[in-house]
Structure formats: structure tokens, C-alpha cells
Image (cartoon, coloured by chain):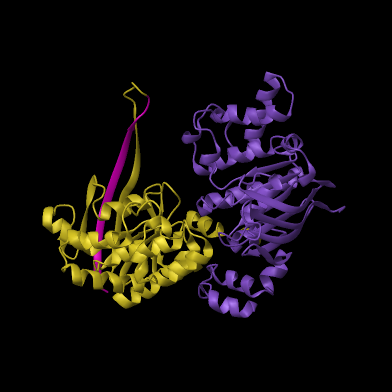
Chain colours: A purple, B yellow
């Protein structure tokens, strides 16, 4: 446990009315302190449900069982109030579509201030200073403090979300496809920013994506999810260079090779089913 | 090689009045004197970040946007002056596939209706021949007959993009403009759609104008590339040559942003 900040043990997620239907099937995953772990998989593989389970933000129609241990405390034993105190402070999250996560009728300055104010008792002038500091850290000019979300570009909106997420110096940052909706150039900027922040604040990151190219850029460790299960996990270089599971190999075949040497190979699901037995 | 479409000196400026009562105007050059030739049977990729004018270029070619300046010649027809039936006939020959398959299919129409509509608008065949045409097209894109009686919401994102492709190809166009057709899809689905587009190109001898911000896809589908930035065309050439020997700083920057390349810079 010493080097691990979060341990997920035998996590299962299922609908309230059908406990036999497992959406996440008994997964176990440990996050090393200060490292970035990527969960990679297709849509429907259960990667977002896993992230939401850690935050305890699952839909009320879903339930979970197992253990999620964060710094020696089992999050599943905490009361709603205790969870709420940690959520946003110890563990923060950013999402795929920043526009739907921001309130369109409030300025970004107000929204960042609100995020800080929930967990920290600061007077108005201190709050203002903290908001400007955060804007600087994520690379937004401070004169945009009174801008509304629709006045910002997609990349800038994601920077605002990141500012809110890191506002209370969380130990763990969960990023659920934060760059999927962005252009490649902006994606590269955001990935670089997240990587810098991780080093600067010694954050641990749980990063969710469907693109092995992004995994290569940002991850230290990787877990590959398929149909609710982790089919392979390990150090990123090992998995990329020497994938063991047939599904990992198939998913890697879908990533377009920038050198154009390897052909694109869509997943042949019937062959995959045979290979998995 | 035969040139299918020739565009010369295209310009388009968007003017915006700032403030509620103020008369102050700012303008953005979405297209700044762009000239492009599209050769028959190849895939020409248009690359650039959002706001570079690539979608404006695509839409102006089929006159969904009226240009300020420039000329467009498609199969010896001046696209900027033709009207009425002639424009309709030419548009049948240039079809478009859109980025968001959720937004570009009418949610209240069954797939059969979505596929019939273009045929009816252009008065092609009777209901029996239309049905057999639709059936063979829907099979070509990997769907089945039973899918015709379903609604768009019953399909996944990748399947919906297959429907968008079938709808575009049902009119047997020569030029297909693909506006970020795979940007909204997972890599696994993206690979399927790119392979599908390639095999359909071979089968029907299609010409593609393929708009994207992802250079990895360009490498797999395009013969030639143009790079756009802030409405200007800043580099063009054969795909291999652009990848091996990019001339401008901006193209180099785009190549460096390819996912999987960042770690190599560290």
C-alpha cells in the first residue's frame, strides 16, 4: 500500500434491478503514487464506470461492490457527507466535454472561485488572488477572468476545468477522455499541461482514453479494458512493445501508424472471440 | 491526370458586428485566396486546426456558402453561376459526409426513408428499382435489410456513419466531400470506417476531398494533402513528401502533435 495511493479490489458494477448483469466484472487495479495510469478501451468497455465508481458518482440506477481503498480508507464505507468532503479536495475529476460541465451563465472566474471556496476558507481578496494564480498555472490570460464559457475556445474551456480540478491540490486527478473532443494540436497542449502539473504538484493521475497514441504520450502504467474486464495491465512500454492479450493486439492494430508502414486493421470480433476461447 | 474540380482564388470573409448597439465591425478571413485542383480518382486531404477554414472550403465547393470571390469549375461547369436544375444536377454529382452522424440523420425518419429521399428529389427510378438500389447500397456499407425499418437512435455511432455514407453514395456521385467523418468515433470504429471508405473508393472509382485535423488518418487515406491555417493555404503536395519533408514550421508542428509523438520529444 505504501507506494499505492489507490487500490481497487474486486470492483463490480451492476444495475439495481439485475445484479447478475455485470457492467464492470470484478476488476482490481492499483495506482502508484505520482504516476499516470491509463485505462484504455472501446466505448462500452466499462472504463468510465470504473472512474465514476472511484468518485462515487454512479447513476442511482447502478450499484457497486468490492473495495476502493484511497490512502488506507475504504471509500465504500464512508457516508455521503464524508465522501463529499473528499470529492474535489483529495480526488478531482475532469470530463470529456468541458462545455457541458461549465455553467454557461456564470463567468469562469466565478466558477473557479466557487470550486476553491467549497473546500477552503478564504476571504474575498485571497480568493481573487488564488483564482488569478490558477489561471496563470493553466495558461489562461488573467484578463479573461470575467469571460463566459462560450467566449472561450474548446482548449481554453478544458483549461478552466483543469484549473477548477487542481484548485484544492488534489492527490488524485481522474481525467475521463479530456482531449477526445479536441483538435490534435490542442490535444498535445493539454496533454503537456497535465503532464507538467502532475510533476509540479506530485499528483497521481487516472487517465481514461480509447486511443493508444494518447496512452503512449502520457501513461506510466496502462490497463486495457474489454467488456467490463481488465484483460491486460502493466508498464506502458511493455504493453505497447509486447502486447500479450489478443484484444490488446487487436486494439493496437486500429491505431493509425503515422509512418504509414502498418495497415489499419479493424478489429475482427469473431476471430477475437475464438482467440479468447 | 484529369482534373475533376478546379478552384481558383477563393475568398470568403465573415463580418461580425461587436457589441449590442455598436457599429464596430470585425472581420475574419475564412478563405484567403485559396486555389485547389482535385484530380479524378484520388483522395485529397485538407488538414488544419479548428478555425482554419477547412469546412468553409468544403461547403463553398457545393455552394452551401456563397463566396466573395473566386471561381469553381467542376466538369467544365462554372459552379458559381449555374442555377436551378443545372445546380441540382451538379450537386447530385458532389455528395457530402458529415462529422456528426447523430446530427445529420433525421431522428424521425426510418432508414428506408432517409435513403429514399435523395432518389426521389432527383427523380431516379420507381419505387421497386429504388428499393433494390437501396438494399444493395446498405449491404455494401455493412448493414442488413432489417436495418431499413429502424430509426437512427437504434444504431451505434459507427453504424450511423455507415448510413451517412450509404446516403451519400446512393446518387452515384463522382466527388465525395468527407468533413471529419471519423473525428467523433472511437479508434476501433474509426479504423472500420476508414477501411470502408477506401474499399468503396476502389469499387466506384470515387474522388474524395477528406477534411481532418488528424494527420495519422491522412497517412492512411490520402494521396495528396493541403495544409490550411487561418484561411490560408500554407503547404501542399503528395502525402509521402509532406510527411517526410515538411517545409513550413506549422506543418512540422502539426506532425509533432500526432498522438504517440509527444513522448519522443521528452
> Principal SS element in the magenta part?
strand
Q: Position of residue A201 (x, y in %)?
A: 75, 42
Residue at (61% x, 46% y) in the render:
A59
**Is B195 left, or right, of B188 in this rendering?**
left
- Side (left or right) of A131 relative to A172: left
Residue B237 counted in the magenta span: no
Quarter of the image for the C terminus of chain A: give it: bottom right
Residue name at image x 16 percent, y 66 percent: B124
Residue B205 seen:
no
| Image x and y of residue A18, in percent | 62, 56
Residue B219 location (% of width, % of height): 47, 68
Give the quarter of the image for residue B30. top left
Query: Of all residues shown, which one is farthest toward the top?
Result: A124
Give above or below for A155 relative to A31: above
Magenta stretch encompasses residue B7 = yes
Q: In this view, does B10 lie above or below B41?
A: above
Give the residues in magenta. B1-19
**A229 lies left or right of B8:** right
- Outermost residue on the front side: it is A17
**Left or right: A171, with A133 as reference point:** right
Q: Which residue is drawn at 73% across and 56% down?
A: A11
Asked whether the viewer can see residue A146, the reply is: yes
What is the x, y in percent for residue A17?
61, 52
Amino acid at each position: 500500500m505504501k507506494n499505492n495511493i489507490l487500490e481497487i479490489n474486486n470492483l463490480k458494477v451492476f444495475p439495481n434491478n439485475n445484479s447478475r448483469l455485470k457492467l464492470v466484472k470484478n476488476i482490481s487495479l492499483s495506482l502508484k503514487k505520482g504516476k499516470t495510469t491509463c485505462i484504455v478501451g472501446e466505448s462500452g468497455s466499462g472504463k468510465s464506470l470504473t472512474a465514476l465508481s472511484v468518485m462515487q458518482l454512479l447513476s442511482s440506477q447502478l450499484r457497486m461492490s468490492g473495495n476502493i481503498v484511497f490512502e488506507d480508507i475504504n471509500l465504500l464505507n464512508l457516508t455521503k457527507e464524508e465522501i463529499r468532503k473528499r470529492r474535489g479536495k483529495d480526488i478531482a475529476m475532469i470530463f470529456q466535454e468541458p462545455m457541458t460541465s461549465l455553467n454557461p451563465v456564470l463567468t469562469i472566474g466565478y466558477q473557479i472561485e466557487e470550486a476553491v471556496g467549497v473546500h477552503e476558507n478564504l476571504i474575498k481578496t485571497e480568493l481573487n488572488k488564488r483564482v488569478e494564480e490558477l489561471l496563470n498555472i493553466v495558461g489562461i490570460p488573467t484578463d479573461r477572468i470575467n469571460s463566459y464559457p462560450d467566449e472561450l475556445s474548446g482548449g481554453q474551456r478544458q483549461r478552466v476545468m483543469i484549473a477548477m480540478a487542481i484548485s484544492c491540490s488534489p492527490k488524485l486527478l481522474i481525467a475521463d477522455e479530456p482531449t477526445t473532443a479536441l483538435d490534435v494540436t490542442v490535444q498535445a497542449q493539454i496533454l503537456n499541461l497535465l503532464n507538467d502539473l502532475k510533476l509540479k504538484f506530485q499528483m497521481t493521475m487516472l487517465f481514461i482514453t480509447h486511443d493508444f497514441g494518447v496512452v503512449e504520450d502520457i501513461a506510466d502504467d496502462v490497463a486495457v479494458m474489454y467488456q467490463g474486464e481488465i484483460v491486460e495491465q502493466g508498464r506502458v512500454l511493455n504493453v505497447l512493445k509486447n502486447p500479450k492479450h489478443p484484444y490488446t493486439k487487436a486494439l493496437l492494430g486500429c491505431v493509425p501508424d503515422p509512418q504509414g508502414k502498418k495497415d489499419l486493421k479493424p478489429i475482427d470480433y469473431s476471430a477475437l472471440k475464438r482467440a479468447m476461447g | 491526370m484529369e482534373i475533376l474540380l478546379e478552384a481558383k482564388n477563393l475568398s470568403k470573409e465573415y463580418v461580425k458586428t461587436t457589441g449590442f448597439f455598436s457599429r464596430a465591425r470585425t472581420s475574419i478571413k475564412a478563405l484567403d485566396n485559396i486555389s485547389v485542383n482535385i484530380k479524378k480518382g484520388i483522395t485529397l486531404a485538407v488538414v488544419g486546426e479548428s478555425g482554419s477554414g477547412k469546412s468553409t472550403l468544403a461547403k463553398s465547393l457545393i455552394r452551401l456558402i456563397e463566396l466573395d470571390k473566386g471561381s469553381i469549375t467542376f466538369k467544365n461547369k462554372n459552379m458559381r453561376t449555374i442555377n436551378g436544375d443545372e445546380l441540382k444536377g451538379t450537386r447530385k454529382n458532389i455528395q457530402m459526409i458529415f462529422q456528426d452522424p447523430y446530427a445529420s440523420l433525421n431522428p424521425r425518419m426510418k432508414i428506408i426513408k432517409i435513403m429514399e429521399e435523395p432518389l426521389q428529389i432527383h427523380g431516379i427510378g420507381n419505387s421497386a428499382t429504388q428499393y433494390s438500389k437501396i438494399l444493395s447500397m446498405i449491404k455494401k456499407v455493412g448493414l442488413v435489410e432489417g436495418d431499413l425499418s429502424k430509426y437512427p437512435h437504434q444504431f451505434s455511432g459507427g453504424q450511423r456513419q455507415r448510413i451517412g455514407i450509404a446516403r451519400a453514395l446512393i446518387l452515384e456521385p463522382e466527388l465525395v466531400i468527407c468533413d471529419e467523418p471519423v473525428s467523433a468515433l472511437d479508434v476501433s470504429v474509426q479504423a472500420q470506417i476508414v477501411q470502408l471508405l477506401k474499399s468503396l473508393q476502389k469499387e466506384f472509382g470515387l474522388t474524395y476531398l477528406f477534411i481532418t485535423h488528424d494527420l495519422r488518418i491522412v497517412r492512411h487515406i490520402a494521396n495528396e494533402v493541403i495544409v490550411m491555417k487561418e484561411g490560408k493555404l500554407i503547404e501542399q503536395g503528395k502525402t509521402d513528401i509532406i510527411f517526410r519533408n515538411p517545409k513550413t514550421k506549422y506543418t512540422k508542428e502539426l506532425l509533432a502533435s500526432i498522438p504517440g509523438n509527444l513522448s519522443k520529444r521528452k
